[in-house]
Amino acid sequence: DTAVSQTPKYLVTQMGNDKSIKCEQNLGHDTMYWYKQDSKKFLKIMFSYNNKELIINETVPNRFSPKSPDKAHLNLHINSLELGDSAVYFCASSQRGQRPNEQYFGPGTRLTVT
Amino acid sequence: GQQVMQIPQYQHVQEGEDFTTYCNSSTTLSNIQWYKQRPGGHPVFLIQLVKSGEVKKQKRLTFQFGEAKKNSSLHITATQTTDVGTYFCAGQGAGNMLTFGGGTRLMVKP
């Protein structure tokens, strides 16, 4: 069974479009995250979210918004896509208070903006 | 904000040679985690270090956490081609957020 899944795996779209990436975890974790990995492999946290608190990395443009319909899902919506948004986006989850509190990553969504 | 630096960025080794990557945080950490990302894959958790001066081993991998809880290292003894990938350290401060280092990409020549 896949612990953290993302759809789609690949997404090619044009500048200015709006798109969403979906993420689901079946681990029963209470916290989910979105990361952006650029072409140089830098992994940058974008959001951390549990049912009470959304923490936003202040460097993330407000064109990006996380949406959580329930505890097992955290989708990423992107408005007005730009060329610089091209990257691999990873969803992850973890459980607060667990030792170790490792994060489980999804397989990634490769976004290409043309 | 918290910054985590990792060196080297790249390392080419001959199979059988040792490999070390180093991680430094600008702030004291509550714990440090290490992840491995195979080419085309996603980061996979390796280990978490919590205590000052802690040393943990996983087969040929040795992980250390500095006394001041601001630096860490991963050492691989006698590398194999299966060790290829990018190794990330990730520091955790007071909250749940992890700050990842830039990663060290390890390439192993057979």
Image: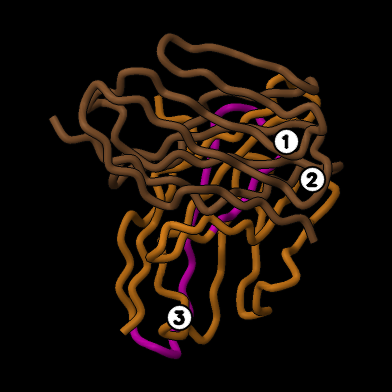
Assign a secondary structure to mark 3: helix
- In the figure, is residue B75 to the left or right of B47? left
In the rendered image of the structure, the colour used to display chain B is brown
| Mark 3 to mark 2 CA distance (whole Å) | 30 Å
Eye-nearest disc, 1 or 3: 3
Name the residue located 44 percent from the left edge and 65 percent from the top edge.
Answer: A38
User: Which chain does tag 2 point to?
Assistant: A
| Mark 2 to mark 1 CA distance (whole Å) | 7 Å
The magenta region covers A14-35
User: Which chain does tag 3 point to?
Assistant: A
The quadrant holding residue B94 is: top right
Which residue matches tag 3? A84
Mark seen at residue A51: 2
Instruction: Specify the farthest residue to the left.
Output: B110
Which residue matches tag 1? A30
Assign a secondary structure to mark 2: loop
**Of pointers 2 and 1, the one earlier in the residue sequence:** 1
Contact, mark 2 vs mark 1 (Cβ under 8 Å): yes
**Of pointers 3 and 2, the one earlier in the residue sequence:** 2
Disc 2 marks which amino acid? Asn
Name the residue located 68 percent from the left edge and 33 percent from the top edge.
Answer: B32
Disc 3 marks which amino acid? Gly
In the rendered image of the structure, the colour used to display chain A is orange
- Is residue A31 rendered magenta in the image? yes
| Mark 1 to mark 3 CA distance (whole Å) | 31 Å
Disc 1 marks which amino acid? Asp
**Of pointers 1 and 3, the one earlier in the residue sequence:** 1
Residue B6 position, x and y percent, is 56, 48
